[in-house]
Image (cartoon, grey):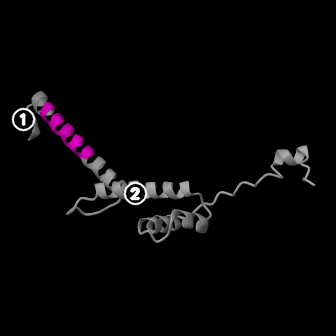
Amino acid sequence: MPEKITPAAASTGAGKAARKRRTRLAPSQKYEVFTAVLTSAATQRELAEKYRIDRSTIQSICKTAKTGALDALAQAVPGRPRGTNLEQAELVEARERIARLEKTVAEQAMQLHLIEGKDSWG
């Protein structure tokens, strides 16, 4: 005889296939998934079963890893010392600020020279 589902059970999802809990992978596990796909060490289906994740998640991991790798390679310039992106951004910003301040000081010195003349300096 078929199982009767009460209204309370229907609203909680009892009697239906339960949804899978979301599995969160650590970055190291994501890297393992990416390298396994990249080296053809395992199929996406095998990895999905092993880590209990959906195959679309594996595709997303691979896409993110590829994008990150391409960005990192684009930033890498042979012959230049390596640093973090944040440090490089701060360094560029500091150099721009120094250049603006040097220009401002030179302009102010020129204005002072024109207003007061050279004699008042020495």
> Which of the pair 55/114 is nearer the observer?
55
Name the residue that disc number 2 marks.
66
Q: Is residue 23 left or right of residue 37?
A: right
- N-terminal of the pair, mark 1 or mark 2, is 2
Q: Horizontal and vertical percent for residue 6?
A: 91, 46
- Residue furthest front in the image: 1
State which region is magenta.
96-111
Residue type at mark 1 is Lys
Q: Residue at x 25, y 45 (%)?
A: 96
Nearest to the observer: residue 89 or residue 57: 57
Where residue 56 sits: x, y (%)? 54, 54
Label 1: element kind? helix
Image quadrant assignment for residue 47: bottom right
Q: Is residue 45 above or below residue 64?
A: below
Which quadrant, please, contains the N terminus?
Answer: bottom right
The residue sitting at 18% across, 39% down in the picture is 103
Q: Is residue 3 left or right of residue 89?
A: right
Magenta region, main secondary structure? helix
The dot on residue 22 is: none
Task: Please state which amino acid type lies under the numbered disc 2.
Answer: Lys
Along the viewing direction, whichever of 105 and 96 lies nearer the viewer: 96
Q: Are marks 1 and 2 in contact (CB under 8 Å)?
A: no
Residue 100 located within the stretch drawn in magenta = yes
What is the C-alpha distance between the residues marked 1 and 2?
Answer: 62 Å
Q: Secondary structure at mark 2?
A: helix
Q: Given the current orientation, which residue lies at the most extreme left position? A: 119
Residue 59: in magenta span: no
Q: Which residue is mark 1?
A: 118
